[in-house]
């Protein structure tokens, strides 16, 4: 979240992707950085133990959500 906020401040469209258990931390970081509504997408957890099909599904979901967020407006 921090890196995405900094990128946005420097003029580069950005958003974050995290797994569901980290939503609270992402929301807190956005508030601390002064942008409580900074966009982010969530994907299923866990990543480390997911098989190749699970990773592909998460990657596809992440791309779809990122595209929707970055092309909104």
Image (spheres, rainbow, N blue to C red):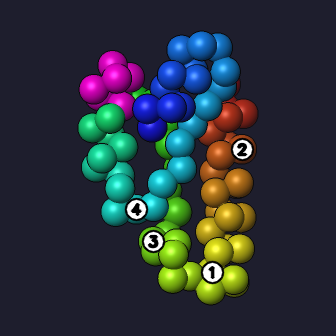
Q: Which residues are magenta?
A: 30-35
Label 2: which residue? Answer: 67
Of marks 3 and 1, which one's residue comes earlier in the chain?
Answer: 3
Q: Are marks 3 and 1 in contact (CB under 8 Å)?
A: no
Label 1: which residue? Answer: 54
Of marks 3 and 4, which one's residue comes earlier in the chain?
Answer: 4
Rendered residue at 51%/75% (across/down): 48
Of marks 3 and 2, which one's residue comes earlier in the chain?
Answer: 3
Of marks 2 and 1, which one's residue comes earlier in the chain?
Answer: 1
Q: Quadrant of residue 30?
A: top left
Of marks 1 and 4, which one's residue comes earlier in the chain?
Answer: 4
Regarding mark 2 in the picture, which secondary structure is present there? helix
Mark 1 neighbour class, 10 Å CA radius: few under 14, some 14 to 19, many 20 or more: some
Examine the rendered structure and indicate whether residue 60 appears above or below residue 40.
below
Q: CA distance from mark 3 to mark 4?
A: 6 Å
Regarding mark 3 in the picture, which secondary structure is present there? loop
Label 4: which residue? Answer: 20
Examine the rendered structure and indicate whether residue 19 appears above or below residue 46.
above
Rendered residue at 36%/43% (across/down): 26
Mark 4 neighbour class, 10 Å CA radius: few under 14, some 14 to 19, many 20 or more: some
Regarding mark 1 in the picture, which secondary structure is present there? helix
Q: Is residue 7 magenta?
A: no
């Amino acid at each position: 979240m921090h890196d995405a906020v900094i990128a946005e401040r420097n003029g580069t469209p950005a958003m974050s992707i995290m797994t569901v258990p980290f939503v609270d931390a992402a929301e807190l970081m956005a508030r601390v950085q002064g942008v409580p509504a900074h966009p982010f997408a969530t994907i299923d957890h866990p990543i480390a133990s997911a098989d190749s099909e699970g990773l592909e599904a998460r990657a596809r979901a992440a791309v779809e959500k990122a595209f929707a967020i970055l092309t909104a407006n």
